[in-house]
Amino acid sequence: MTKISICIATCNGEKYIESQLDSILSQIIESSEVIISDDCSTDKTLQIIDSYKDPRIVVLPNQNFRNPIFNFENALKYSQGDYILLADQDDIWMPGRLDKMIPLFENYDLVVSDCRVVNENLEVLTDSYFASVGARTGFLRNLVRTSPYIGCCMAFKRKVLEKALPFPKNIPMHDFWIAMLSECCFKIKLIYEPLLLYRRHSSSVSFTASMNPNPFHKRILYRINTLLPLMKRVLR
């Protein structure tokens, strides 16, 4: 039986983690797993997670990364699924998300869905992230332009994960690393339908390129710090 792993990096996510877990657990079967790596939360995040008493949830508490990239990497290292999905602690999966993504693995290695960008009250800010960035596949296009690859919208086969790990220490974001590696080595499918509510608020720890507050020279460095280790990994 095919096993699915959902990997979540948490850190002080008490405000939203329950709604996110509810949206995920309602879509996965008993053989699936939710791997949660918690980066030293000081609020009630772990208590909320523990209250589920759900055998599908595996918690890795007391991590001390202080970094969402390597907190996600920790969750990914413990995953056992044939297919892996990344999930943020504050988003919400829309109904039927897995049913629309998983069948595409018959022909593709990495599948990325569109999302609706919402605020902390789930009011829609952008109805289609893909439309806002002109989403298309293509290595050079997505290296220099705003990338459509948001981690929480991605699902990939285990062979993609095996190629992506370990994460190079200086990469700017894990999702961009996985996506650009997949552009080089694997088959990618974009789903032009929002299957997730992507919550943006003052406590968000990640950002999309279109919301990137960094100046131009830092965005160039962002790409260099992805491209150099990418070349080494592809040639390895």
Image (tube, rainbow, N blue to C red):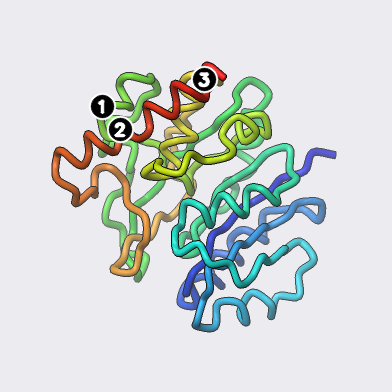
User: Is 143 left, or right, of 184 in this rendering?
Assistant: left
Residue that label 2 marks: 223
- Classify mark 3: residues with Cα within 10 Å, few (<14), some (14-19) or many (20+): few
- What's the residue at 14%, 39% (across, down)? 216
150 over 201 or under it: above or below: above
Discs 2, 1 touching: Cβ within 8 Å = yes
Residue neighbourhood size for the residue with mark 2, other residues' Cα within 10 Å, grouped as few (<14), some (14–19), many (≥20): some
Question: Circle 1 sits on which residue?
Answer: 144
Above or below residue 59? Residue 79 is above
Q: What's the residue type where badge 2 is placed?
A: Arg
Q: Quadrant of the C terminus?
A: top right
Q: Residue at x 79, y 38 (%)?
A: 2
Q: Residue at x 71, y 53 (%)?
A: 28
Q: State the image coordinates of residue 68 (x, y, percent, origin top left).
A: 46, 57
Q: Quadrant of residue 121?
A: bottom left
Could you give the CA–CA distance between mark 2 and mark 1, rounded to whole angstroms?
A: 8 Å
Picture coordinates of residue 4, whole percent (x, y)? 71, 45
Which is nearer the N-term, disc 2 or disc 1?
A: 1
Q: How many marks?
A: 3
Label 2 to label 3, Cα distance in Å? 16 Å
Left or right, residue 122 beside residue 91 = left
What's the amino acid at mark 1? Val
* x then y, percent, for residue 76: 63, 48
Indicate whether 187 appears above or below 124: above
Quarter of the image holding residue 164?
A: top right
63 to 34, vertically: above or below: below
Give the mark, 3 or 1, whose residue is nearer the N terminus.
Answer: 1
Q: Residues within 10 Å of mark 1 (few under 14, many from 20)?
A: few
**Closer to viewer: mark 3 or mark 1:** 3
> Which quarter of the rendering shows the N terminus?
top right
- Residue identified by numbered label 3: 234
